[in-house]
Amino acid sequence: IAKQEIIEKIRHFGVTFLGATMSPMNAWLAIRGLRTLPVRIKSLDASIRQVICFLQSDYRIEKIYHPLCGDETQKELANKYLSGMGSLFSFVLKDANPEIIQKFVDALQHFTLAYSWGGFESLVLPAFKGNNVQELKQRHLSIGHIRMYVGLEEPELLIQDISNALDQAYQ
């Protein structure tokens, strides 16, 4: 719901810069992806639950940011409004420093450095980039803040990968 003036601006911009319709190839790709979406979402929901359960039990994880990990009020809201859990989450490595972060990310074998969220592969993206400590402080983020997306790989494989990476990072 918006003012007609805003709707017209958006419509004009979209037609002018994006075209009035999508190409046949893009339409086919969208339909193809939508046909398998329910199956993929169920798989992602089951996988994220297992990965979160593992991370909650690891002493090297300071905090996890995901609806499954909130306080009781947040969990109630998630259960009330969400029919499944998304597999994008973040966590904070305990006592992290640049070396630990580097070792952790480099040791991951089944997580690719994130470039586009929401595909089928598992992804990782550390908040710390080596030169952005001030920005992280402004955003109230620890340098140990890591963002991950659990993809369609077997959850046991991903859990083992994360466990091995944590072991290497904290040697």
Image: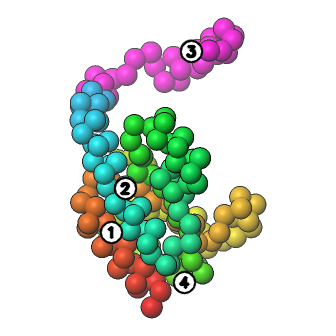
Looking at the image, the residue that sits furthest to the bottom is 171
Q: What residue is shown with label 4? A: 99
Q: What residue is shown with label 3? A: 11
How far separated are the C-alphas under marks 2 and 3?
40 Å
How far separated are the C-alphas under marks 3 and 1?
45 Å
* Residue stretch in magenta: 1-29
Residue 38 position, x and y percent, is 28, 35
Q: Is residue 33 left or right of residue 75?
A: left
- Mark 3 and mark 4 lie on one chain; the one further toward the N terminus is 3
How far separated are the C-alphas under marks 4 and 2?
29 Å
Tell me, yes or no, whether the two marked residues, 1 and 2, touch with CB atoms within 8 Å.
Answer: no
Give the label on residue 127, or none. none
Q: Quadrant of residue 140?
A: bottom right
Residue at 27 percent across and 27 percent down: it is 31
- Is residue 108 something one can see in this rendering? no
Q: Is residue 138 left or right of residue 49?
A: right
| Mark 3 residue element | helix
Q: What residue is shown with label 1? A: 159
> Disc 2 vs disc 3: which is toward the camera?
2
Residue at 69 percent across and 11 percent down: it is 3
| Mark 2 residue element | helix
Q: Is residue 10 left or right of residue 39?
A: right
- Mark 2 and mark 3 lie on one chain; the one further toward the N terminus is 3
